[in-house]
Image (cartoon, rainbow, N blue to C red):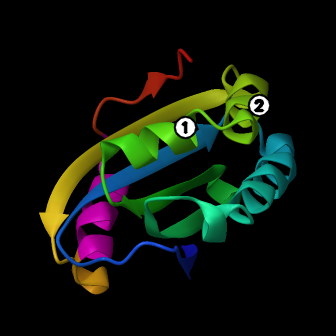
Amino acid sequence: MVKSWTSGPAGRSGEVLVSVTDFTADHLRDMPGIHLAGTRLARLWPGLEGAVGHWLWAEPLRRRCGSVSLWQNGKALRAFVALPEHREIMRTYRNRGTLRSTTWTTRDPELPEVWSQALAFLQGDHGRQPYAG
């Protein structure tokens, strides 16, 4: 699994919200576009209020990709989801695969522990459903 950590402008002390996404594309041919769109979106990260940090991850040959992101709170995550750039990606790919996601809160997170918890979710099959947008 290819992954990379990017820090955001918010600190990770205190309680944070962890969000995990797991998208599986129906077709391998969509993966380059998904990767490019995600990379462009990640460039906004340093200026996102309430963003603690994130990993982008991918398993290209399995047609899977997603993120594990840490936020100061739900308001910050909702502001990200509402960004025009994020909404455009979801509009473009919503009917081209399945999406799973989960969130939880943790206090003063240690990054290896957060990744380990996220990986447990990513390695499981918790009732994949088509993305309904």
Q: What's the residue at 40%, 30% (across, down)?
A: 128
The magenta segment? 114-125
Q: Which of the two residues, 90 or 15, is positioned nearer the viewer here?
A: 15
Side (left or right) of 107 relative to 31: left
Mark 2, secondary structure of its residue = helix
Quadrant of the rendering where the C terminus is positioned: top right
Q: Quadrant of residue 127?
A: top left
Where 44 sits versus 34, above or below? below
Q: Main secondary structure of the magenta part?
A: helix
Mark 2–mark 1 distance (CA, rounded to whole Å): 10 Å
Mark 1, secondary structure of its residue = helix
Query: Farthest residue toward the top?
Result: 132
Task: Look at the image and say whether residue 115 sits in the magenta stretch.
Answer: yes
Task: Look at the image and say whether residue 106 sits in the magenta stretch.
Answer: no
Q: Which of the two residues, 4 or 54, is positioned nearer the viewer here?
A: 54
Q: Quadrant of residue 129?
A: top left
Where 16 sits versus 110, above or below? above
Q: Amino acid at mark 2?
A: Glu
Q: Which residue is mark 2?
A: 88
Side (left or right) of 78 relative to 30: left
Quadrant of the rendering where the N terminus is positioned: bottom right
Q: What's the residue at 75%, 66% (across, down)?
A: 43
Side (left or right) of 132 relative to 29: left
Percent x, y of residue 88: 77, 31
Percent x, y of residue 3: 56, 76
Q: Which residue is mark 1?
A: 81
Q: Amino acid at mark 1?
A: Val
Percent x, y of residue 30: 82, 41
Q: What's the residue at 43%, 59% (across, down)?
A: 50
